[in-house]
Image (tube, helix red, strand yellow):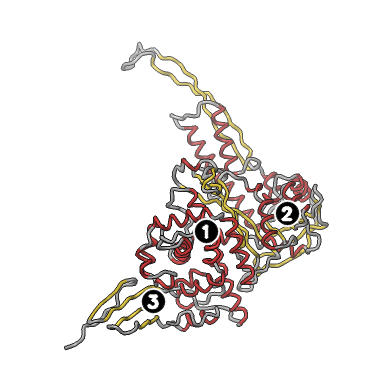
Amino acid sequence: MKRPLLKTPPLGDTAQAAGRTLHSYHLGLLPILNRLLTRLRLEPILRDYLPPEDRRSRISPAQGLMVLLKNLLLSREPLYGVPQWAARCDPAALGLAPQQIAALNDDRIGRCLDQLFRSDCGSLALAVATQAIAEFDVKLDELHNDSTTVTFSGAYLDAARETKRRGQTRLAITWGHNKDHRPDLKQLLFILTVAKDGGVPVYFQAKSGNVVDDRTHRSTWDLLCKLTGRLDFLYVADCKLANTENMAYVHGHGGRFLTVLPRTRSEDRTFREALAGGRVRWRWVHDKYDEEGKLADQFRVSEPAATSVEGYRLEWYHSTRKAELDALARARQLERTLKDLAELQQKLTSPRTRYRWRAKVTEAVEAILQAHGTMDWIELEIEEHEQEIFRQERRGRPNDRTRYRRQVKSRFELKYALNHATLASAAVSDGVFPLITNDRQLSEEALLLAYKGQPVIEKRFEQLKTEFEVAPVFLKEASRIQALLCLYFFVLLVQALLERELRRAMARHQIASLPLYPEGRACRRPTTPQLIELFENVQRHCLVVGNKPPVVMTTKLSKLQRRIVKLLGMRMVYDN
């Protein structure tokens, strides 16, 4: 008689047959992430900062937060879906015992977030970043800062104002300048600082939704000084840094800053007038090439260098690529403006138009021009015409004795044309942007390249909102949302370190690319989502036969998987 076949069960499930038991679990990228998290000492640091653990608790807050962190990195399930995800994974890889998996639920994870909120997320993030910098030798010569908004749907009535909860400040989820272009929704502000070295996040802050960016730079710079233990790093930020108080603060404390000068400054207007008058000389400074070796952009700098009203160094650059984009953007602005004006004109000619008064027509026209920023580029005139209308004095079928009453109504017509003089003046400034700094030693090219590193932080924000789907957040308590944002900072940190380690290993071994794209196509800059997909098929099985010791089996790695594990210096992580 044949022994019954033992079929492989679904992941996280158990199959039994003829005294044999097979447990199958998903493993994926967890061993690699665990090695990085061990080097970060994230769980020990969490235990140090979280409130004392309750011995009656089946899962400690640090363990629960680590499980949630791994879920955010690999699967991004909502809070209520984390227990089902964890049940499919190898318990040992999650840092849990098998009996703890059954105790995992969304309510327990929520209480772990409560404990994280009580621990002072800012100090915790600083401690983890300090460990990351020391362990992975992250260079801190150049730091980039920016902010984004995390947008929320829902009332959040009890979070309209900042309050004190559990000894910490609970932020206000409220309206502010929304960078997702959703002024109708409430928000929190997420401020991030990354190192130029690999775009590694080194610090984050969460602020209330109505906090203005320019009020955050001084406190951020102080914290970065504490993190780096130095004052001479180059602090690169957007134009909100370029106000007199912020620049004076950094300069007065011995720091270095680099930012772009806002269009509202008088120096900007003066330079553009000189540019329109042909009084500016340009000198080549840098050529940018794409990955295929083709010329993508050319940069020039004006000479001599200018000085701001505060006495800081002011360098004006011209980009050929930016000039093309500026011209294209202006053409689109004009196209949309003319389309809206044509639609408004059609409404004015309608028999049932609501635009009966000049003031209302003027208001509608100004709203269109201001919305598209074309106020100076279009010449517009509103013409008023009188229209005679004759109506019967009384109801009924008209006849030869019917008397009519004459009415005169105003009708409006738009006459508009492009102002070619102002358009030509605007075109002269295409591709021009000013950088302001207190550093007198860096060359014009070095300043340009430092500022051009700013998009690396935009990439982190893109990952936060697309790959990791930071919103929507299915949490009602604002304090838990703040704690979740702290975890997302750790998520960005781990992802950046993983990509940095792999890319640096490729550079050391002179490997130009890896076949990570579909059909084995070459990938020059591997990303974490690609690695997650590559290792998705890796499983771990535990076979128990009678009273014998269990036999643990792991999916045999492919050639590419083994190559990546070797590059990362983690040869033993997938051994049974």
For the question of whether residue 455 can be seen, the reply is: no
Which amino acid lies under the numbered mark 2 shown in the image of this protein? Pro
For this orientation, the residue located farthest to the front is: 55
Q: Secondary structure at mark 2?
A: strand
Mark 3: few, some, or many residues within 10 Å (few <14, many ≥20)? many
Give the spatial CA distance, label 2 vs label 3: 54 Å
Instruction: Kindly identify which residue carries mark 2.
Output: 434
Q: Position of residue 279 (x, y in %)?
A: 81, 52
Viewer-side residue, 41 vs 406? 41
Q: Position of residue 380 (x, y in %)?
A: 61, 36
Q: Secondary structure at mark 3?
A: strand
Of marks 3 and 1, which one's residue comes earlier in the chain?
1
Q: Are marks 2 and 1 in contact (CB under 8 Å)?
A: no
Instruction: Kindly identify which residue carries mark 1.
Output: 50
**Which label sits on residue 539?**
3
Which amino acid lies under the numbered mark 3 shown in the image of this protein? Gln
Instruction: State which quadrant residue 350 falls in.
Output: top left
Mark 1: few, some, or many residues within 10 Å (few <14, many ≥20)? many
Q: Position of residue 473 (x, y in %)?
A: 45, 53
